[in-house]
Image (cartoon, helix red, strand yellow):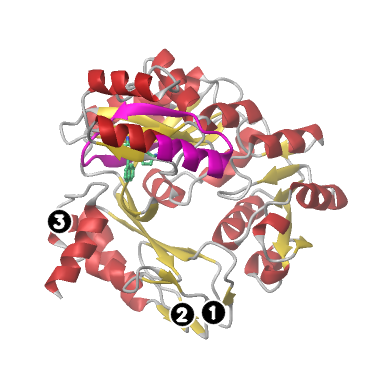
Amino acid sequence: MFKKILVANRGEIALRILRAARELGIETVAVYSEADRDSLHVRFADEAVCIGPPPSSASYLHIPRIISAAEITAADAIHPGYGFLSENAHFAEVVESCHIKFIGPSAEQIRRMGDKAAARKAMVAAGVPVTPGSEGTLQSPDEAASVAAELGYPVIIKAAAGGGGKGMRIATDETSLRNGIRMAQAEAEANFGRGEVYLERYVQNPRHIEFQVIGDRHGNLIHLGERECSIQRRHQKLIEESPSVAIDDELRTKMGSAAVTGAKSIGYESCGTIEFLLAPDRSFYFMEMNTRIQVEHPVTEEVTGYDLIKAQIAVAAGVELPWKQEDVRLRGHALECRVNAEKPDHNFQPSPGKVSYVHAPGGPGVRVDSHLFSGYTVPTHYDSMVAKIITWGRDRMESIVRMRRALEETVIEGIDTTIPLHLRILEDPAFLNGDIHTGYLDEFLSLEHVSK
Ligand code: MV4
């Protein structure tokens, strides 16, 4: 096992990883920017190294400074968390070339799944269902037009280098397709330095369902059920849950085997997520693979009883996965509400600043993953998420009732948060019915606006 892990991240995920390392008896190193000097992750770690000024580009994304911090402290592994450098294949390569273990998959697996067109090809080759679409990337607008004519409109244009919704365009006819291709290419070129795009038939009103997988280097790879992540705005998830009301045992077995087949086909090691679109007719299609631990991993932990971060560290150290697929049981229901420092009634405008007072909820079935404390200042430089409130119940309704109660107990003074919006969603009949899809939140917000 590792002796010392450096956590190349901040906020709640840095705390989550430090906690796992401590339980495993592994020493810890935090890195921090000048904006995070007073943060909890600095205090929780055995050692802490300042890696630069507040902008991420000069600190949490600055590879030489992070490597230097690991070398100075003699860390033998680096955990990247999520965001920042977690899906940067070059970083994984540099870490390994310094004889430090990158806690995640190989650089090659990150690179392969980071190219969305290559990921799609790999899944087709493995026999995982993908939406009908172009063979690979498109060479010309004329080729796009003939592929689209065969697929039938609407189609969706995706950037090979994109992901998470960046560089996407929907086209309803040939004119909008030709315009869309040009705009998507320009956007992808500007954002990722790579303009290639591909086409898929557009699936209307799908659910976003993702399967958690974990693999080791001995060829074992299992799934840990699904997460329903349809409640999102501009590709930022707000509420996640496990299991999904749309999935019964039969569909879970089918989608879970597809996820395992897909991940095994690339020899995947570590925690990962296979994202699917689930259509109203229950057909499902591979969308993307995320090669990191995700924000919403706690709902899977709550229903499986497994500690995903401890498992991720152990498999990175070469330990054999101690679980078999048939051991995995999903017990009860878990919900996660992301608490962001934002004004949900003013177009989700950021609301950074000093948190004069905080009181976290507690009691049965409540878990809070947060770096907040009374007197903490939410900096302007980073993501706005300040807490994740996770509830568990024997069934979905019990987890919802507990979530309402937990959100009502929560006190966060000095900044605005998404808590009032969560409480309104948790009363919405469509949500209570499990009647959700990727357009749900936009519809909910515009309907609320009309009725006010
Ligand atoms: C799609 C789709 C419909 N049809 N692909 C959005 C993010 C990226 N992972 C892929 N996305 C989509 N791909 C086909 N063929 C709809 C989306 C999509 C979406 C997916 C998941 C969650 C929210 C979404 C919001 C808008 C569009």
Q: Quadrant of the N terminus?
A: top right
Displayed quadrant of residue 190: top right
The kind of residue tagged 1 is: Gly
Question: Which stretch did the figure color magenta?
Answer: 182-211
Which structural element holds mark 2? loop
Residue 275 visible somewhere in the drawing: no
Task: Kindly report the distance in space between the C-alpha atoms of the residues bearing marks 1 and 2.
Answer: 6 Å
Q: Nearer the viewer, mark 1 or mark 3?
A: 1
The kind of residue tagged 2 is: Ile
The kind of residue tagged 3 is: Ala
Lateral position of residue 193 relative to residue 102, left or right? left
Residue 450 visible somewhere in the drawing: yes
In the displayed structure, 164 sits above or below 123; it is below
Lateral position of residue 167 relative to residue 244, left or right? right
Give the labeled residue for mark 2.
415
Give the labeled residue for mark 3.
430
Pointer 3 or 2: first along the chain: 2
Task: Kindly report the distance in space between the C-alpha atoms of the residues bearing marks 3 and 2.
Answer: 29 Å
